[in-house]
Image (cartoon, helix red, strand yellow):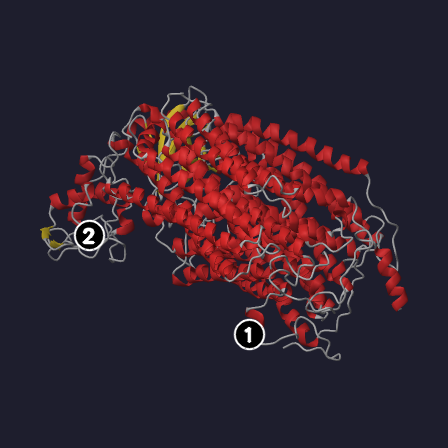
């Protein structure tokens, strides 16, 4: 079963402020809950029906009481509103000296790109004590960048940039969740935010992870671009499977055949409407402008690697989708 | 228990014909308010996107033929006039006049739908149908074609739903014609005609707003008529 | 409601007014009024709506409840438009993308 | 069919027999029973989905169903419960049955429209059911674009059409109620002599009529975007997915008041009858219902605080959201004040009323948490919000619905339910409910996101508690099904006024005749004047 935490860690400058507001609201709520529960139990027992034809005195109401329990709750709610708004202003405006990092939400991964060139997937390394500002967008559905320990959450909307910021106050490893339902592996779109001592962060920054092989990058791109969504290995998706495709001839709607060589694959990525495989709908979106040329090469390389190989398994290190 | 007679003039759940008439009229007005909110959702989308992409909306709006639109609006106003004359005839119990004006209303309604069909066909020729790969609006950059599609999505959604309401109206009026011919309506019982009239005038009011908002955006920019 | 029957003259007058206003709104659209063109177009449309509602839909002779229902409906449409635009109109005021 | 042992007195159940007498009935009482059957089916369908969800969440890795199936489970749980149970629940059953009787009318203003409303709900339900059986829909009951229009390849269209059609059932019922209350009150039945049940349904009908059409057009636009690719909300064309959320929540927040206002109406009746006292501040409770109906349309933006809505709109909506909390607080205080110096009996409906007030208070107060901008950023889309709205929907509406069903069962069927079993199931439901949903507040603040079927290990203990609670709750809900059906055959015969209530509906036989009253009723006394009832009881002896 493991541990049973009952309260989240406070790991950012805004966390204590949110929690103080929470304590205030908890206090008000506990007070009124006890008041109502207490009144009900007391009245229910004190004024229980004693005889079948008992007729209690008629009380129609009292204006004073009505005004009392309108003004007091209204006053309390206004305090809650102003305090909540103040915290919200702080949560919305990143300081000017914050570290700029870009985040791209994609079906089912977080891509984080540091200005220094580091690219991370589902992981974010940041230094202690420095404000970090994330400018985010989505490449497909709506996601939401949520770090409970920092008390911050911000939806990531396709076609627009949204911003969130936080200043970590405790080194450590904190959960990163996607908080807006985005499809099949929404609950898999999670990761970690590593808050490191400033000097460790510098060494990490200069280290930089080496790029993988073309096929590996292609395979990663293949999943990243959600090609796996439709081009399923078992041919169940809405599009033709690409396993064993490379080098064979393909029948097109409206007759005509074409050899599945690099040119065909490249054209199908950038202008999918040009040639449609027989029996399939032209549903594939164009990736024109979405993928750079070298990325297309990575994809081609990957599709080659899952093409028909004389007797050998798929290239080592490459999982079939 | 006095068993309650259940006739057209006085349904069993009502006590007086006046009560029944008030109930039907109130019921139709409340239904018209639900229709206001129904079209309201699309007016909201129109407002948001026109604010966001005013220029593209102006060019797209100029691609519509404003004169035909104006004439069509006139036709619909005429049908409203004949409808109210039919209601007036029903109030006076003049059976022949009801049928005359209902026929005229149906005629103008049909004319409006005919012109609408013509306009849509014209849009089809000019490849202004949103969602089609062949969509293209002249005078708009390729990257803006999407915004133009937004205009035409709204154009077809709003005029399409308006036309659907017209078709329902035509159905209603035809039913009234048959009933009127059978002499169902008299000076004491004409609620269905009155209520159908309210519906028809409402559909006209929707078009009164649709016409300027869709057809007449910044016409002064001198784009082709 | 049933008691009052309007004269044909009233209806014809209202019809003519509506047709004229349609012509006016079409013509005015070709005049460069800048931001006011929307205001003018909507005002004319509102006048036409009032004409149809008051005369053709007999709102003039209707009881208070019916008038209240009409007013309520238009107010709710106003709520939908105004509060949604409170979002779209104030985007970017904070200078932070997305807020 | 149900026969009473007493000499054969004609009433609405034995007036006619056969399928046609039910499927083509114009009697608001029979239509209410048709609705009762329909929504009970969907309640247990939705409940089944909920049980599977809770079982799946027992373990952090959630091995029982795949993620795709889990996504369909919570979506179908939401759709079945919200659109096919909670929204029709009290208005369509108790409202349909008792509203005409309470105002002394023979039927609703438009009986055939009422039957059409039931058919619309059934047809809509069949569409949704087809979608569930054919493969399910995995967009969440909120259908957010662009996932629902572009990326989901599940039965979105069939479900959306189902909701679109059942929406008109809600609109037409609202319209029917408003016209009935305005035009068909018995002589002497002034507005301030109306039972508060009627006021609550008047307010609910206002929301149904003004809000539902907006979700209808939203679904239509979603349909056009998904099928014809005309993109109103499609970001690729420059559309804005947040506009969909505005249109969706413009209806869906007032919809939560469609679900809870009728429950408040039932509670007003129960509190008054079982403390045998007129309600404290009748006018305040009546006007707070209408105030809730109006203010509920100004607050929907609190669902969009982190969705890309501008900061200043967030301020406006947070401020207005606190306004809508005040009338609910007034109601709770007035109910509690009614108990003061009353003559309180602990029949089952009163237990449900106590449960309602307690749980609705917790639900309402946690609403203040999510309305505060600062806290909502952290808790939105987490289990905190799930707990908040279940406290109001399950703790509130379903408790009141069961309370109302027990209270009106004698009048509807002429049979008394077994008091002992009923009390037991009320307590089981109260305990099971709290064990299910209170841990979710803690889970939510810890950061457990909603709609996750795989979660970090440290959340498991709380999830296990919640699942344990859910199984207790399931038992609690099954018990009434059993003893209600049992009571139809073996239950005690119910007198005309078993609870000593003052409403006109209790001044006619149980079950009532086809035209409700033997002679047209006249309202002669103020609302909730128990002196008149006690007098009769003493005379009858």
* Label drawn at residue C61: none
Residue behind mark 1: D19
Alpha carbon separation for disc pair 1 and 2: 57 Å
On the rendered image, what quadrant is the C terminus of chain B found in? top left
On the rendered image, what quadrant is the N terminus of chain B found in? bottom right
Horizontal and vertical percent for residue D145? 40, 44
| Element carrying mark 1 | helix
* Most foreground residue, A213 or C43: C43
Establish if B198 lies above or below B141.
below
Left or right, D39 with reference to A207: right
Left or right, D173 with reference to D78: right
* Most foreground residue, D422 or C40: C40
Q: How many marks?
A: 2
- Residue count near mark 1 (Cα–Cα under 10 Å), binned few <14, some 14–19, many ≥20: few
CB-based contact (under 8 Å), mark 1 and mark 2 = no
Residue at screen point 67% across, 38% down: D326
Horizontal and vertical percent for residue A224? 29, 42
* Most foreground residue, C44 or D333: C44
Residue behind mark 2: A242
Residue at screen point 73% across, 36% down: A70
Instruction: Tell me which chain the residue with mark 2 is part of.
Output: A
């Amino acid at each position: 079963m493991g541990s049973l935490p009952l309260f989240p860690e406070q790991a950012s400058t805004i966390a204590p402020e949110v929690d103080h507001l929470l304590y205030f609201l908890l206090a008000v709520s506990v007070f009124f809950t006890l008041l109502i529960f207490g009144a009900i139990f007391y009245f229910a027992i004190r004024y229980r029906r004693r005889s079948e034809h008992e007729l209690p005195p008629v009380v129609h109401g009292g204006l004073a009481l009505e005004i009392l329990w309108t003004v007091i709750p209204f006053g309390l709610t206004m305090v809650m509103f102003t305090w909540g708004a103040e915290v919200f202003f702080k949560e919305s405006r990143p300081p000017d000296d914050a570290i700029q990092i870009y985040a791209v939400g994609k079906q089912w991964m977080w891509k984080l790109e540091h200005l220094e060139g580091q690219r991370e997937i589902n992981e974010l390394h940041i230094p202690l004590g420095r404000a970090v500002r994330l400018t985010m967008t989505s490449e497909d559905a709506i996601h939401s960048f949520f770090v409970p320990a920092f008390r911050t959450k911000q939806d990531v909307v396709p076609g627009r940039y949204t911003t969130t910021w936080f200043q970590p106050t405790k080194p450590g490893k904190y959960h990163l969740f996607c908080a807006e339902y985005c499809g099949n592996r929404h609950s898999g779109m999670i990761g970690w935010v590593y808050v490191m001592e400033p000097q460790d962060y510098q060494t990490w920054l200069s280290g930089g992870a080496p790029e993988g092989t073309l096929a590996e990058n292609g395979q990663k791109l293949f999943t990243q671009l959600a090609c796996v969504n439709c081009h399923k290995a078992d041919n169940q998706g809405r599009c033709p499977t690409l396993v064993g495709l490379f080098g064979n001839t393909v029948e097109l709607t409206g007759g005509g055949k074409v050899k599945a060589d690099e040119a065909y694959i490249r054209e199908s990525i950038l202008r999918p409407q040009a040639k449609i495989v027989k029996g399939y709908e032209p549903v594939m979106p164009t990736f024109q402008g979405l993928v750079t040329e070298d990325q297309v090469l990575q994809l081609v390389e990957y599709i080659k690697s899952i093409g028909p190989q004389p007797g050998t398994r798929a290239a080592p290190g490459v999982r079939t989708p | 228990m006095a068993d309650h007679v259940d006739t057209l003039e006085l349904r069993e759940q009502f006590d007086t014909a006046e009560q029944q008439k008030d109930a039907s009229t109130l019921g139709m007005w409340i239904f018209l308010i639900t229709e206001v909110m129904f079209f309201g959702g699309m007016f909201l989308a129109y407002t948001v996107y026109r604010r966001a992409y005013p220029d593209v909306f102006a060019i797209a709006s100029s691609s519509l033929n404003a004169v035909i639109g104006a004439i069509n609006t006139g036709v619909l106003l005429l049908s409203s006039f004949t409808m109210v004359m039919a209601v007036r005839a029903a109030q006076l119990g003049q059976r022949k006049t009801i049928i005359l004006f209902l026929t005229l209303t149906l005629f103008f309604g049909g004319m409006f739908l005919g012109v609408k069909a013509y306009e849509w066909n014209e849009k089809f020729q000019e490849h202004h149908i949103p969602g089609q790969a062949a969509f293209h609006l002249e005078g708009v950059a390729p990257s803006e074609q999407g915004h133009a599609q937004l205009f035409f999505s709204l154009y077809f959604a709003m005029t399409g739903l308006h036309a659907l309401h017209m078709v329902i109206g035509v159905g209603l009026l035809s039913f009234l014609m048959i009933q009127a011919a059978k002499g169902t309506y008299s000076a004491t019982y004409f609620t269905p005609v009155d209520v159908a009239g309210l519906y028809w005038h409402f559909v006209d009011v929707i078009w009164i707003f649709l016409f300027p908002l869709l057809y007449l955006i910044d016409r002064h920019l001198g784009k082709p008529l | 409601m049933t008691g009052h029957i309007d004269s044909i003259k009233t209806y014809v007058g209202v019809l003519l007014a509506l047709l004229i206003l349609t012509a006016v709104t079409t013509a005015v659209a070709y005049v460069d009024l800048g931001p006011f063109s929307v205001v003018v177009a909507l005002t004319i449309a509102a006048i036409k709506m009032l004409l149809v509602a008051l005369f053709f839909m007999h709102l003039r002779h209707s009881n208070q409840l019916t008038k209240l229902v009409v007013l309520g409906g238009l107010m709710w449409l106003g709520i939908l438009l105004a509060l949604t635009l409170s979002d779209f109109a104030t985007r970017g005021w904070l200078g932070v993308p997305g807020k | 069919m149900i026969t009473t042992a007493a000499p054969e007195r004609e009433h609405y159940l034995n007036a006619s027999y056969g399928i046609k007498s039910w499927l083509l009935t114009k009697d608001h009482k029979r239509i209410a029973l048709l609705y009762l059957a329909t929504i009970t089916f969907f309640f247990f369908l939705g409940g089944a989905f909920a049980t599977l969800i809770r079982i799946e969440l027992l373990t952090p890795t959630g091995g029982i169903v795949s993620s795709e199936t889990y996504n369909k489970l919570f979506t179908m749980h939401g759709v079945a419960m919200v659109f096919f149970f909670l929204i029709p629940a009290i208005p369509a059953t108790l409202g349909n049955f008792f509203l005409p009787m309470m105002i002394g009318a023979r039927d609703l203003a438009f009986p055939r429209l009422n039957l059409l409303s039931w058919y619309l709900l059934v047809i809509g339900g069949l569409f949704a059911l087809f979608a569930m059986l054919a493969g399910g829909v995995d967009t969440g009951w909120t259908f957010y674009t662009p996932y629902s229009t572009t990326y989901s390849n599940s039965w979105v269209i069939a479900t959306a059409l189902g909701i679109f059609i059942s929406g008109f059932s809600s609109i037409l019922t609202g319209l029917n109620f408003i016209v009935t209350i305005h035009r068909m009150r018995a002589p002497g039945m002034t507005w301030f002599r109306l039972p508060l049940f009627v006021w609550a349904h008047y307010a609910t009908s206002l929301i149904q009529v003004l809000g539902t059409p907006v979700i209808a057009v939203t679904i239509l636009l979603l349909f056009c975007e998904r099928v014809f690719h005309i993109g109103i909300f499609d970001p690729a064309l420059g559309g804005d997915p947040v506009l969909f959320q505005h249109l969706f929540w413009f209806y869906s927040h007032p919809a939560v008041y469609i679900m809870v206002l009728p429950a408040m109406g039932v509670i007003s009746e129960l509190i008054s009858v079982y403390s045998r006292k007129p309600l404290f501040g009748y006018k305040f409770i009546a006007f707070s219902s209408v105030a809730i109906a109006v203010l509920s349309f100004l607050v929907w933006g609190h669902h969009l605080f982190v969705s890309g809505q501008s900061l200043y709109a967030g301020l406006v909506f947070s401020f207005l959201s606190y306004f809508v909390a005040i009338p609910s607080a007034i109601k709770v205080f007035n109910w509690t004040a009614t108990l003061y110096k009353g003559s309180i009996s602990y029949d089952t409906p009163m237990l449900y009323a106590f449960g309602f007030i307690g749980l609705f208070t917790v639900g309402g107060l946690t609403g203040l948490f999510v309305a505060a901008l600062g806290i909502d950023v952290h808790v939105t889309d987490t289990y905190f919000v799930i707990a908040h709205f279940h406290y109001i929907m399950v703790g509130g509406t379903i408790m009141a619905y069961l309370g109302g069903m027990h209270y009106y069962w004698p009048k509807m069927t002429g049979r008394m339910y077994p008091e002992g079993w009923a009390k037991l199931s009320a307590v089981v439901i109260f305990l099971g409910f709290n064990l299910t949903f209170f841990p979710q507040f803690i889970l939510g603040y810890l950061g457990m996101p909603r709609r996750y079927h795989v979660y970090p290990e440290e959340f498991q203990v709380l999830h296990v508690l919640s699942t344990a609670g859910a199984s207790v709750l399931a038992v609690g809900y099954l018990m009434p099904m059993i003893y209600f059906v049992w009571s139809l055959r073996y239950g005690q015969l119910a007198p005309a006024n078993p609870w000593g209530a003052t409403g006109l509906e209790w001044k006619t036989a149980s079950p009532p005749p086809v035209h409700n009253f033997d002679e047209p009723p006249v309202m002669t006394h103020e609302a909730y004047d128990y002196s008149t009832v006690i007098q009769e009881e003493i005379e009858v002896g």
